[in-house]
Image (tube, rainbow, N blue to C red):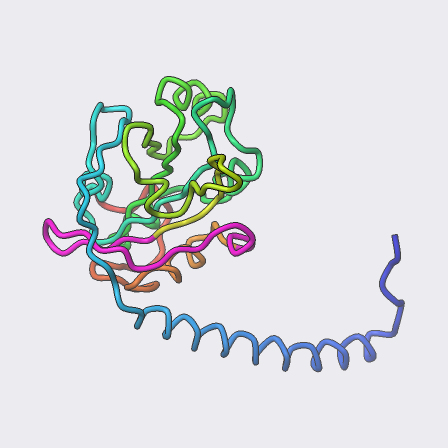
Amino acid sequence: MSLPEIVSREQWRAAREELLRKEEAVRRAREALGAERRRLPMVEVDPEYVFEGGDGKATLLDLFEGRAQLVVHHFMFAPEWEAGCPCCAAFLDQVGHLAHLRARNTSFAAVSRAPFTRILPFKARMGWAVPWYSSSHCDFNRDFEATVVLDGEQVERPGVSCFLRDRDRVFHTYAVYDDALDGLGSLAGLLDLTALGRSPVGSERLRLHDEYEN
């Protein structure tokens, strides 16, 4: 492994200042891109998708849990697999406590094509409390391009889809797949993908996760 060059503190500070200017330019570009993302048009979701979760059957509207926004992690777990995808598992490990998202009027859920009877023991093995649903009896994964057909075979791909609710109407606002998930998983990273951004209606300052009001 090649190690960084050893320099004096003054040389390091000068190099750091030069890099800082580039980092600031990237940050400003990222903020502009985020604003453009929030201006994207949205598409109403017409099909009545029905999932299976810990409390039985649930619709896409149910996954919002009454909040304005929903972030769905398309977790790769095909019906014939014995366990979920390690890369998707690493992503979900980074999501952290959902209280911070929920306090910002945003729900989070994982969705896979595996039957819930396979999801449940794997979820317990991983020690996750995140809501996780099976889409094995609907076309949700295919419609939102988390399951695609290549050479005549269905192939799973990781992704994140964002949805916005207006009363009982649900809209698809954004989606990312594959390598675009790199660097996501944090609170700010997930909120930046949503239509309302980091400060949706009902947002409040950051607190310890057990100090938010229900």
Q: Is residue 112 left or right of residue 17?
A: left
**Can you say whether 120 is above or below 157 in the image?**
above
The residue that appears at 46% across and 30% down in the rendered structure is: 77
**Can you say whether 105 is above or below 114 in the image?**
below
- The extreme left residue here reads 167
Asked where in the image residue 189 lies, by quadrant, the reply is bottom left
User: What is the x, y in percent for residue 82?
Assistant: 51, 20
User: What is the x, y in percent for residue 91?
Assistant: 51, 43
The residue that appears at 29% across and 46% down in the rendered structure is: 107
Q: Is residue 14 left or right of residue 157?
A: right
User: What is the x, y in percent for residue 212?
Assistant: 28, 47
In the rendered structure, does residue 82 fall within the stretch colored magenta?
A: no
In the rendered structure, does residue 176 fall within the stretch colored magenta?
A: yes
Asked where in the image residue 65 lies, by quadrant, the reply is top left
User: What is the x, y in percent for residue 196?
Assistant: 28, 64
- The extreme front residue here reads 152
**Can you say whether 107 is above or below 199 in the image?**
above
Quarter of the C terminus within the rendering: top left
The residue range painted magenta reads 162-183
The residue that appears at 34% across and 63% down in the rendered structure is: 198
Foreground pick, 112 / 151? 151
